[in-house]
Image (spheres, grey):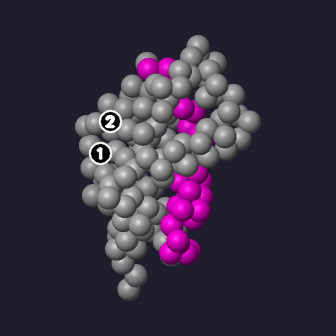
Amino acid sequence: MMLYRDLFDESYSRLFPDDDKQPFFDAFFNRFIHMTPETEQHFAAVEPRLLRNFVYKSFFAMLMVDGVLMVPDFLERLARQQESNGVRLPPNFFAHWRRAILDTVAERDPACDEEVLTAWAMTIAPGLEYMRRQAELHYQPGAAL
């Protein structure tokens, strides 16, 4: 039996030595905002500090949503604030978010393989889906940023 939680935890430890989250996050963030011409155009209209802060908080809060399907209050507030704080991620951007995370893990984890990527995909899925669904419910295309 494959223990994907263990694979994720081991990878997380390699990616965040001494709990230093900045190098990984910087690589992920840059990859995410430049995933497509659509993401670049969207994020060019968002205040950079606000965007970075929102994505950072959301990234790590999403990791706290797991198989028990309990959403931390903090993530719930972030998901609902994105309309009012100017970030306004369209629902389809969460597929780009997922791809950016997995590509960054593959690039930065020296022991990464397909099983490690599967562990990451399984770990981030509940939180990403929650955020995507909130965007689906509340995103208004064409609204001013």
Instruction: Say which amino acid is labelled 2.
Output: Glu
In the rendered image, which residue does mark 2 sit on? 76
Residue 90 belongs to magenta span: yes
Q: Distance between the residues labelled 1 and 2?
A: 7 Å
Residue displayed at 39% across by 58% down: 16
**Left or right: residue 107 compared with residue 1:** right
Q: Nearer the viewer, residue 37 or 65?
A: 37
| Position of 116 relative to 89 (above/below) | below
| Position of 140 relative to 61 (above/below) | above
Whole-percent x, y for residue 125 in the image: 45, 55
| Position of 134 relative to 20 (above/below) | above
Classify the position of the N terminus by image quarter.
Answer: bottom left
Residue 31 belongs to magenta span: no
| The disc label shown at residue 71, or none | 1
| SS assignment at label 2 | helix
Whole-percent x, y for residue 12 in the image: 39, 63
| The disc label shown at residue 85, or none | none
Asked if the residue at tag 2 contacts the one at tag 1, i.e. Cβ–Cβ closer than 8 Å, the answer is yes
Residue 13 sits in which quadrant? bottom left
| SS assignment at label 1 | loop
Residue 134 sits in which quadrant? top left
**Left or right: residue 26 compared with residue 79:** right
**Left or right: residue 23 compared with residue 16:** right
Instruction: Say which amino acid is labelled 1.
Output: Val
The magenta stretch is: 85-114
Q: Which of 25 and 51 is in front in this view?
A: 25
| Position of 114 relative to 51 (above/below) | below
